[in-house]
Amino acid sequence: MNLPLASLGVIRTNIFSSCFALEKNVVLIMKTIEFTKMVAAGNDFVVIDSKAGIAESKLKQFAQKVCDRKYGIGADGLLLIEKSKKADVRMRIFNADGSEAQMCGNGSRCAALWAGGRVQGTGSSKKVIKLETKAGIIES
């Protein structure tokens, strides 16, 4: 699937600090995470690199907090970009409610633009990016 990159909006390099309450004593752990806020055809996403180190068990809760429009950054979804052995990158999509989606067309446009200059650390943009998703490999 080749999707045009027209109508994409990007806010680069923001910082989000997340707090998690652990146990009953409300111990707060603050972690600063670099993210990119992107918009494609009316859907907005928070895009982060998996190197941010968010624990797998916390991804659902993290997506809910980040996507909250009142107390978080506010977005329709969270895109987590990971390394892939099958494609240029792997894209995991978390909806605002924390559920993980199989694929998202507008999300893939954002992920392709985000990953374009980062693929294999080249610093140059590729014309077509292959994204591994739960639904399979797509091109964007």
Image: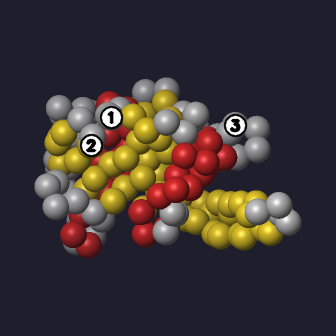
Q: Residue furthest top?
A: 42
- Residue linked to disc 2: 133
Q: Nearer the viewer, residue 39 or 87?
A: 87
Let me know if residue 124 appears in the view: yes
Q: Position of residue 87 (x, y in %)?
A: 16, 54
Q: Earlier along the polypeptide chain: callout 3 or callout 1?
A: 3
How many badges with numbers are in the image?
Answer: 3
Q: Earlier along the polypeptide chain: callout 3 or callout 2?
A: 3
**Image point (25%, 56%), residue name:** 89
Give the CA distance from mark 3 to mark 2: 26 Å
Give the CA distance from mark 3 to mark 1: 23 Å
Instruction: Name above or below for residue 140 compared with residue 35.
Output: above
Neighbour tally class for label 3: few under 14, some 14-19, many 20 plus, Cα within 10 Å: few
Q: Amino acid at mark 1?
A: Gln
Instruction: Name above or below for residue 2 compared with residue 65.
Output: above
Q: Secondary structure at mark 1?
A: loop
- Residue linked to disc 3: 69
* Res 102 label: 1
Let me know if residue 125 appears in the view: no
Q: Amino acid at mark 2?
A: Thr
Q: Amino acid at mark 3?
A: Arg
Neighbour tally class for label 1: few under 14, some 14-19, many 20 plus, Cα within 10 Å: few
* Res 80 label: none
- Marks 3/1 in contact by CB < 8 Å: the verdict is no
Q: Position of residue 85 (x, y in %)?
A: 16, 61
Which of discs 3 and 1 lies nearer the camera? The answer is 1
- Marks 2/1 in contact by CB < 8 Å: the verdict is yes
